[in-house]
Image: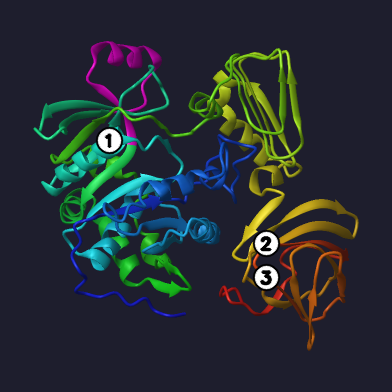
């Protein structure tokens, strides 16, 4: 594995370096969001994912450098492919070997940003799963936060509260700093309803957005003061990091030594340099189906209904499907969500509790699979959708991105039949290489070395029928692989 080489005298930048946190495994948007394909990588409404929307918000080269993305091993190819689809370059993709909350991730990203862009760099920390209207008011707040960070402040964004929400932390603003930012008076943990109502009545309280703007030098100094164990572990993890294709793997032994704490708890609640920018822009953390409904475009009956749905005599409801046609009749204030293999139905007001339902499903062997993987799985070359599973056979739809190829591989327990339905396939079987076009097929015997590639300009799609005594994904013996998986 190649060692990443970083210049010790990097050029200084006056632009903001965005750091996008994309490693979370949200469960409250089940059944669309699952462990191996969480909400930031899912299309809810529109043709982009939340992660791609986040990338686009930091794509102005006059304001931003190329982003650093912090994610994990499981999501690395989703990150790379979704950035590639938008033609947005990434400065680095940091892979966390273990989950350690936000403090360690921030410390590692800040350390790397200082090495790549200079110690005077300003970084903006963004969650990849928030929905934000990036209008003029949004970028006005970004520039106010940048100026405050340039003056040495550790800045957070306080969202104007529209209701006494109990699912968010709050920030009480203090003395004005003269540039649109304020000192932070105090942070308030997620409150009970009566306390949230009182804070809204009193005024001066804002939702804690989880978006930050940090000057790297001051951030590292405050980490050294208030969370030295976090900084030491993250710094060592970066210095011992290794390069794998386009990814930077943080050293597992050192990173795991970091305390498992948030950046709010590590420094923001302790530092005297905390500042907040009151932010009027539209924001949602998309943490529940209720939040998705609130952020959507509602019809005359208050419904948010996605494509492939029929809604009759129904009000104030969310109806979405990523699979079968979904028909809902005579319902009020409900969420009806269908994936390819599971359906959730429940009151919108209870959607914060979907995570508890997912834990119940995950604890039973018969239903655990519905919380872990989608029928559609993504790979660095494209992906596949499971269509049907039977006794000693299964059917899949395979899709391959133009110019990509699967590993040269073989199987011990299964043979495969491929039928091309779209595009052109380059198929290697043993020493033979052949081209297949639409409506053409080929058979790969058990144990035969083979490979599939897409030499064309459009996505290759084929139907694969597997037969054999064992059909698990771990029966893949990779011989040659351009993604480093041998």
Give the spatial CA distance, label 2 vs label 3.
8 Å
Judged from the image, the secondary structure of the residue bearing numbered disc 3 is loop
Neighbourhood count class around disc 2 (C-alpha, 10 Å): few under 14, some 14–19, many 20 upward: some
Residue 339 position, x and y percent, is 69, 39
N-terminal of the pair, mark 3 or mark 1, is 1
Judged from the image, the secondary structure of the residue bearing numbered disc 2 is loop
Of the numbered discs in the image, which one, if any, rests on residue 436? none
Please, is residue 259 above or below residue 442 in the view? above
- Which marked residue is nearer to the observer: mark 3 or mark 1? 3
Q: Which residue is mark 2?
A: 459
Residue 88 position, x and y percent, is 43, 58
Residue 294 position, x and y percent, is 50, 24
Range shown magenta: 188-209
Asked whether 430 or 242 is in front, the reply is 430
Q: Which residue is mark 1?
A: 157
Side (left or right) of 414 relative to 65? right
Residue at the far bottom: name it. Answer: 431
Asked whether 300 or 194 is in front, the reply is 300
Q: Which residue is mark 3?
A: 456
Side (left or right) of 299 relative to 254? right
Query: Residue at horizontal 32%, vertical 32%?
Result: 208
> Do tag 2 and tag 1 residues touch (Cβ < 8 Å)?
no
Give the spatial CA distance, label 3 vs label 1.
46 Å
Residue 413 position, x and y percent, is 84, 71
């Amino acid at each position: 594995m190649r060692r990443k080489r970083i210049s010790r005298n990097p050029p200084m930048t006056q632009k903001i370096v965005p750091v996008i946190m994309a490693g979370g495994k949200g469960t409250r948007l089940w059944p669309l969001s699952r462990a191996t394909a969480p909400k930031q990588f899912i299309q809810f409404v529109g043709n982009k994912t939340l992660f791609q929307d986040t990338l686009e918000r930091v794509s102005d080269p006059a304001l931003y450098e190329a982003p650093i993305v912090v994610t994990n091993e499981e999501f690395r190819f989703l990150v790379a492919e979704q950035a590639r689809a938008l033609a947005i370059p990434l400065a680095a993709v940091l892979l966390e070997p273990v989950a350690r909350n936000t403090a360690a991730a921030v410390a590692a990203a800040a350390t790397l940003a200082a090495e790549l862009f200079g110690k005077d760099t300003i970084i903006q920390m963004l969650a990849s799963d928030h929905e934000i209207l990036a209008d003029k008011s949004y970028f006005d707040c970004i520039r106010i936060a940048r100026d405050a960070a340039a003056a040495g402040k550790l800045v957070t964004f306080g969202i104007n509260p529209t209701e006494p929400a109990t699912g968010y932390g709050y920030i009480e603003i203090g003395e004005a700093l003269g540039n649109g930012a304020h000192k932070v008076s105090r942070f308030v943990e997620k409150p009970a309803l009566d306390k949230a109502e009182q804070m809204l009545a009193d005024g001066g309280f804002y939702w804690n957005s989880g978006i930050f703007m940090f000057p790297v030098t001051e951030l590292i100094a405050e980490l050294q003061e208030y969370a030295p164990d976090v900084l030491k572990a993250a710094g060592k993890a970066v210095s011992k990091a290794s390069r794998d294709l386009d990814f930077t793997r943080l050293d597992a032994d050192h990173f795991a030594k970091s305390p498992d704490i948030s950046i709010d708890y590590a420094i923001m609640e302790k530092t005297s340099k905390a500042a907040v920018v009151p932010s009027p822009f539209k924001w949602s953390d998309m943490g529940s189906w209720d939040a998705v409904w609130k952020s959507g475009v509602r019809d005359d009956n208050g419904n948010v209904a996605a494509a492939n749905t029929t809604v009759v005599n129904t009000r104030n409801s969310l109806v979405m499907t990523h699979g079968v046609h979904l028909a809902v009749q005579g319902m009020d204030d409900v969420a009806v969500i269908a994936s390819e293999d599971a359906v959730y139905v429940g009151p919108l007001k209870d959607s914060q509790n979907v995570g508890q339902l997912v834990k119940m499903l995950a604890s039973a062997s018969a239903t655990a699979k519905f919380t872990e993987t989608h029928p559609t799985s993504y790979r660095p070359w494209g992906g596949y959708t499971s269509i049907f599973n039977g006794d000693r056979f299964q059917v899949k739809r395979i899709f391959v991105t133009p110019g990509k190829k699967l590993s040269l591989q073989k199987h011990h327990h299964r043979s495969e039949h491929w039928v091309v339905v779209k595009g052109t396939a380059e198929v290697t079987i043993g020493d033979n290489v052949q081209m297949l076009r639409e409506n053409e097929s080929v058979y790969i015997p058990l144990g035969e070395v083979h490979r599939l590639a897409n030499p064309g300009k459009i996505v290759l799609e084929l139907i694969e029928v597997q037969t054999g005594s064992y059909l698990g994904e771990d029966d893949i013996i990779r011989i040659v692989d351009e993604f480093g998986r041998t």
